[in-house]
C-alpha cells in the first residue's frame, strides 16, 4: 500500500485508488496525504478496490465516484484486429462530422466518449456517406496513447466502435507506441470491445471526488 500526493493529477480535488495485483496506490491532494495514510493503511489493499471501502476511508468528504474502471494495455502479440473497411481519417469537414454524431448523444455520453472537438486528428467509420462513429488517440506521457471512441446513437451495436479502435490501435502499434484502454467495468459493450481486440487487464481504478469544502 502506498499513499502519495498527486503528480500528473495535481489540482484534481479527489482521490484515486489504483489497484494492481496485490497492491494499491492511493493518490490524493498533497494536503490530504497525512490524513489518508492512517485511514488507508488500516484497510486491506483488496478491500480498498471496492467503492464501499473507499467511501468508508474518506468518510463524509466522499463525493461523486467514478469506477471501478478497467485499465488495460494491448501487447502486440495479443492484438486481434477486426476488418476496418469504411474507417479512415477525416481530412476535412471534421466539424460537420463531429456535430452530427454529437447531436445524437446525451451530454454524459459525449463527455465519456472523450472526443476533443478541436483535435487535428479524427478517425471516422462510415455507412455509405454517413459518419456514424468517431475516434481519436489521446496522448499520455512516455508516448503511450489510448483510444477514445463514440458511436452515433442510431448505429450502435453494428461493430463501428470496434472497427475504429482496431484501425487506430493498428497504426499506433506499428509506430511502436504503447496502446492503453480504460472504461468502466460496468460498461459491457466497451469491455467486450477490449476483450475482442486483445487488451490485457493490468489494473483497476476507482476515483472519488472530494466534496466542496472538504479538507
Image: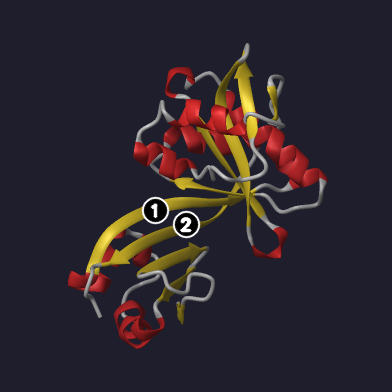
| Up/down of 110 relative to 4, above or below | above
Q: Which residue is mark 2?
A: 204
Residue 22 can be seen, yes or no:
yes
Q: Position of residue 20 (x, y in %)?
A: 52, 63
Residue 90 is marked as none
Q: Position of residue 72 (x, y in %)?
A: 58, 50
Judging depth in this view, the residue of 96 and 142 nearest the camera is: 96
Residue 77 can be seen, yes or no:
no
Pick out the residue farthest to the top.
128
Secondary element type, mark 2: strand
Q: Residue at x 80, y 52 (%)?
A: 176
Task: State how far apart marks 2 and 1 are (Cα).
Answer: 6 Å
Secondary element type, mark 1: strand
- Is 115 on the left or on the right of 84, as rendered? left
Q: Residue at x 61, y 32 (%)?
A: 94
Q: Which residue is mark 1?
A: 68
Pick out the residue farthest to the left.
60
Judging depth in this view, the residue of 152 and 91 nearest the camera is: 91
Categorize mark 1 by other alpha carbons within 10 Å: few (<14), some (14-19), many (20+): many
Which circle's residue, 2 or 1, is located before the other in the chain? Answer: 1
In the rendered image, the quadrant that contains the N terminus is: bottom left
Q: Residue at x 27, y 58 (%)?
A: 64
Q: Residue at x 23, y 68 (%)?
A: 211
Q: Quadrant of residue 89?
A: top right
| Up/down of 76 relative to 206, above or below | above
- Is 201 on the left or on the right of 85, as rendered? left
Amino acid at each position: 500500500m502506498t499513499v502519495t500526493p498527486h503528480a500528473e493529477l495535481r489540482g484534481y480535488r479527489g482521490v484515486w485508488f489504483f489497484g494492481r495485483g496485490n497492491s494499491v496506490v492511493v493518490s490524493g491532494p498533497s494536503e490530504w496525504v497525512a490524513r489518508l495514510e492512517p485511514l488507508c493503511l488500516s484497510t486491506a489493499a483488496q478491500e480498498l478496490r471496492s467503492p464501499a471501502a473507499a467511501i468508508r476511508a474518506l468518510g463524509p468528504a466522499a463525493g461523486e465516484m467514478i469506477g471501478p474502471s478497467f485499465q488495460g494495455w494491448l501487447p502486440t502479440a495479443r492484438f486481434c484486429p477486426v476488418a476496418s473497411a469504411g474507417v479512415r481519417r477525416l481530412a476535412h469537414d471534421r466539424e460537420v462530422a463531429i456535430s452530427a454524431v454529437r447531436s445524437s448523444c446525451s451530454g454524459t455520453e459525449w463527455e465519456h466518449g472523450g472526443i476533443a472537438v478541436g483535435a487535428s486528428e479524427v478517425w471516422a467509420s462510415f455507412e455509405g456517406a454517413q459518419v456514424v462513429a468517431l475516434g481519436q488517440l489521446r496522448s499520455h506521457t512516455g508516448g503511450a496513447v489510448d483510444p477514445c471512441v463514440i458511436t452515433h446513437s442510431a448505429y450502435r451495436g453494428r461493430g463501428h466502435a470496434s472497427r475504429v479502435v482496431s484501425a487506430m490501435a493498428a497504426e499506433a502499434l506499428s509506430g511502436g507506441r504503447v496502446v492503453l484502454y480504460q472504461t468502466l467495468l460496468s460498461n459491457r459493450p466497451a469491455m467486450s470491445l477490449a476483450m475482442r481486440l486483445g487488451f490485457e487487464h493490468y489494473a483497476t481504478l476507482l476515483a472519488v471526488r472530494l466534496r466542496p469544502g472538504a479538507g
